[in-house]
Image (cartoon, grey):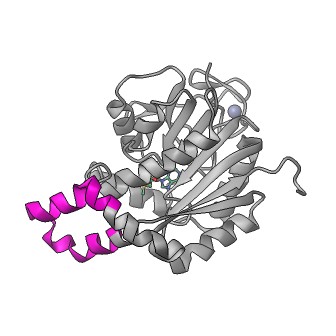
Amino acid sequence: MSWLACPDCHRALEGSRCSACDRVFLAEAGVLALRSRAAEASAAERHYLDLYQRTADPWAYEHLAVERLKAERVMALVDRLAPDGSLVVEAGCATGHITRRLVRRAVSAVVFDLVPQAVATTKALVPAPRADVEYVVASATELPLADGTVDLLLLLDGPLSWKLTEAQLRQVFDEAQRVVKPGGRVLVMDYLTPSKFPLLREAVVRSPLRLVAEHPFPDRLSYVLESMLRALRGLGVVRWFFSSSTVGRVLAALSKPFGHLGSKHVVLECERPHLPSQ
Ligand SMILES: C[S@@+](CC[C@H](N)C(=O)[O-])C[C@H]1O[C@@H](n2cnc3c(N)ncnc32)[C@H](O)[C@@H]1O
Ligand SMILES: [Zn+2]
C-alpha cells in the first residue's frame, strides 16, 4: 500500500497518477517528483540544487562523529515516539544518514527531499529496498500526503535553515498539522547558535502545533572546534579527531552541563492537538 498523495488535492495516487485530479507526475533522477502545480523554483531550491552539483555529500555526515551522534540522538527520540507499525515521514533526507537508521526499524516511511539527486543517493545507499519505504522528491511546504495519516513527522535541519519566506515557514507547520494524526508528533530540529533557538520556538508557538518538550543536543563544543580547525582538516590527525566517536562523546560530556548553551541542535517535540483549541 502506498501512503503517497497528490500535493495539489491530497487524494491518493495510483502509481504516478492522481486518482482525483488525474495529474500525472514524472520522475526526476529516477525518483517520482511530487511537486504542486503552484511550485516554482525558488532561490532556496536553486541554492540546494547548486550545493549538490558541487558536492555529493555537502555536510560530510558519516565522516564526522558529531553528525553520527546527532543521528543516534534523533533515533532515540524516534524509537520512543514511533512504535512498530507507525508511519514516519522524513523531510529533507539529504544523502540518507538518518534514513539508513530509520529503515532498520519496523516502521513504514515516506522519505523526501527538495533535490532529486539527494533522494536518488539516499535510495541507492539504503542496503535493502523495502516496499513500505517510499522515496520521492517533494517540499516540506506542500506535503504529498493525505490528511491525518502520519504518526511522526521529522523536520530536521530544518525549517529555519531551509531559507524559506515567512509565509512558506507558516505553510510547513500548517502542512505538518494537516498530515499528522491528532495526537501524533512532529520533531522540529535545527542547527543554530543558542541565541537563535527562540526564533525556532516562536515559529512553533505561532503554529497550530503544541510544543511538548525541548531536547538540546550537547554538541556545540564539537562544532566550534571543527570550525576553528577547518583549515587543517587535510591533516590525518585532525580528520581522525573529528571522526572518532570516543572524542565525540568526550566533547558531548563537556558540553552537556551547559544545557541549551552547550548545544547547536535543539529538537522541539511537538504534537498535533486532538482539538484545534487545545
Ligand atoms: C542540512 S540537510 C539536513 C539533513 C538531515 N535531515 C539531517 O537532519 O541531518 C538539509 C536538507 O533539506 C533539504 N531541503 C531544503 N529545503 C527543503 C524543503 N523545503 N523541503 C524538503 N527538503 C528541503 C535540502 O535539500 C537538504 O538536503
Ligand atoms: Zn490531485
Question: Which span of residues is magenta-colored?
Answer: 222-249
**Residue drawn at 46 percent across, 56 percent down:** 45
Q: Quadrant of the N terminus?
A: top right
Q: Nearer the viewer, residue 118 or 78?
A: 78
**Residue drawn at 61 percent across, 74 percent down:** 199
Q: Is residue 255 left or right of residue 148?
A: left
Up the image or down, 114 lies above or below 231; here it is above
Q: Residue 85: x, y in percent? A: 63, 26
- The total of numbered circles placed on residues is 0
Task: Decide whether the magenta segment is chiefly helix, strand or loop.
Answer: helix
Report if residue 196 lies within the magenta region. no
Q: Quadrant of the C terminus?
A: bottom right
Q: Residue 23: x, y in percent? A: 64, 30
Up the image or down, 170 lies above or below 185; here it is below
Q: Nearer the viewer, residue 248 or 143?
A: 248
**Residue drawn at 52 percent across, 59 percent down:** 158
Q: Nearer the viewer, residue 26 or 153?
A: 153
Q: Nearer the viewer, residue 50 or 2?
A: 2
